[in-house]
Image: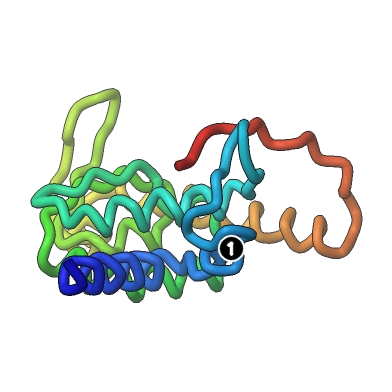
Amino acid sequence: DPAVAAEAERVLDEALRVAQAGFAYDLPDGVDTKVGEEGMSLSGGQRQRLALARAVAAKPAVLVLDDPLSALDVATEARVEAELRTVLASTTALIVAHRPSTVMLADRVALLEDGRITAVGTHSELLRESEHYRFVISSLEDEERRAQAEASDLIDGEDLARPAEPKEAIR
């Protein structure tokens, strides 16, 4: 049925746009390219964006994301976050995050300490009311700055000897 095929293509296009995964169209066989151990190798950020696109395309009632943007550079992360806001507006999501910018996507934040929820509120409320939350966010921001500095050093050529990423099946 052409209408079903057109709708599937529209959903795919939207999901790849949200996840900033348009590179999938440029792969050798486009979106049908086999990736992983038997196929093409992708970077961690590419794998993460394809996984996010798959999750978005499924249009689940509840979306569970575990640090969905951790392997992305800052610019790509910002674009994905902007697009993801529209998806999250109509979806219940549980997001585990270690980047302050990802935490700020949430309407409500639950702070875990030693496996227990110790505070719940908006990002702004928790910044105002929870000393431990302020400490955690500050620590995460420090880690993010260090990671960005290390990435900048890699780009500048200081440490090009990185171990190869393990291959895993994506499709």
Tell me what residue is drawn at x 21 percent, y 56 percent: 126
Tell me what residue is drawn at x 55 percent, y 73 percent: 75
Q: Is residue 55 above or below residue 15?
A: above
Along the line of sight, the residue nearer the viewer: 102 or 140: 102
Q: Which residue is mark 1?
A: 73
Percent x, y for residue 23? 56, 67
Q: Examine the rendering and report whether any part of residue 143 can be seen.
A: no
Which quadrant is the N terminus positioned in?
A: bottom left
The number of numbered badges drawn on the structure is: 1
Check disc 1: other Cα within 10 Å, few if <14, some if 14-19, many if 20+: few
Residue found farthest to the front: 1
Secondary structure beneath label 1: loop
Q: Is 150 left or right of 33, judged from the image as shown?
A: right
Percent x, y for residue 73? 59, 63
Q: Which residue type does callout 1 highlight? A: Asp
Q: Is residue 110 above or below residue 166?
A: below
Which quadrant is the C terminus positioned in?
A: top left
Along the line of sight, the residue nearer the viewer: 114 or 98: 98
Tell me what residue is drawn at x 90 percent, y 58 percent: 157
Q: Is 130 left or right of 149, judged from the image as shown?
A: left
Q: Is 74 left or right of 113, judged from the image as shown?
A: right
Q: Is 17 left or right of 75, judged from the image as shown?
A: left
Tell me what residue is drawn at x 18 percent, y 51 percent: 93
Q: Quadrant of residue 145?
A: bottom right
Along the line of sight, the residue nearer the viewer: 31 or 73: 31
Percent x, y for residue 150? 74, 54
Q: Quadrant of residue 86?
A: bottom left
Residue found farthest to the top: 114
Along the line of sight, the residue nearer the viewer: 113 or 20: 20
Percent x, y for residue 164? 76, 36
Q: Examine the rendering and report whether any part of residue 169 can be seen.
A: yes
